[in-house]
Every structure is written in structure tokens, then in C-alpha cells.
Image (cartoon, grey):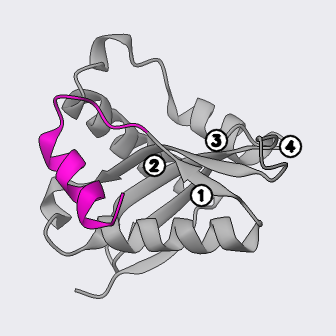
Amino acid sequence: MNINIRKAVEADSNKIWVLMEQLAVFEKYINSFAITPDIVKESGFRKSPPDFYCLVAEDQEAIAGILVYYFLPYTAQNRPAIYMKELYVDENYRGHKIGEQLMQALKEEAVSQKCAQIKWTVAPWNKAGQRFYERLGS
């Protein structure tokens, strides 16, 4: 499988939203999910600075995964940090190390922005997610 990791562009908004909605179902907060494709477009691509940034994993046919993040500009190290808000890979694409590729791209973004660290949380019930991050060394 040939996967390309890149920064999202405004034209990706609807596809990003679909994966955000799938994540809301997976994490069981779909009943309070208030994001729309227009919110993704406005908040992520038209606002300056944007409320969030997004990396996408794509093959020739679809966006297979997303990683949504934002910067924490002020930390105790007086260097920015990245907070990873969402990492989601469409279930049809799991098992191909796409999550690892997205995390590697985030690491590269952190280095290029001189960030002191990458932060995230994982739900206590998400044992597969916890194992994933442990495999990455966290």
C-alpha cells in the first residue's frame, strides 16, 4: 500500500470531517459531536492562525487517516509544544502502520518548529491505543 503523508489543505475539509465523525463514534461521544464540514474549513484553514492543524495519510483513492494537532506556544521550557488532539485511521486501512507514519510526521513537525515536546492523552478504556503509543516508546 502506497501511503502519502502530507499537511491537509482546505479541499480536504469534508474528508477530514468524515474521519472526525468516525472517531466520535469510536470514542463514544457522537451524541455531543458538534463539528461540521464548514467548521473544519473555517477553523482549520480560513482562520489565521488556525485553531488546529492536520496531517493526512492518503492513498490514490482516499484519505486513510488524520492527525489533528495544535501548538501550545508557552511552556516551562520557553519553547512551544505540540498537543496531538486526534489520531484516527479508517478501519479499512488499519494494520498498515499508517498511525506510525502520521506520528513520525508529527515528530518531524515538532522538530521543525523547535518544540520541546509532543503531548497527548489516550482514553483509559482504549487499550489498543495505549499499546500503540507504548510501541512507539511513550
Q: Quadrant of residue 41?
A: top right
Q: Position of residue 88 (x, y in %)?
A: 32, 50
Q: Nearer the viewer, residue 97 or 20?
A: 97
Measure the C-alpha gap from mark 1 to mark 4.
17 Å
For marks 1 and 4, the one nearer the N-term is 1
Residue that appears at 34% across and 65% down: 137
For marks 2 and 3, the one nearer the N-term is 2
Which residue has dot 2 on it? 16
For marks 2 and 4, the one nearer the N-term is 2
Q: Is residue 58 magenta?
A: no
**Image position of 33 (left or right of 72):** left
Under mark 3, the amino acid is Lys
Which residue has dot 4 on it? 48
Q: Position of residue 71 (x, y in %)?
A: 71, 46
Residue that appears at 69% across and 58% down: 116
Under mark 2, the amino acid is Ile
Report the quarter where the N terminus lies: bottom left
Up the image or down, 137 lies above or below 84; here it is: below
Up the image or down, 101 lies above or below 83; here it is: below
Under mark 1, the amino acid is Ala
- Write the start and end of the magenta stretch as one range: 121-138
Labelled disc at residue 41: 3
For marks 1 and 2, the one nearer the N-term is 1
Measure the C-alpha gap from mark 2 to mark 4.
19 Å
Which residue has dot 1 on it? 11
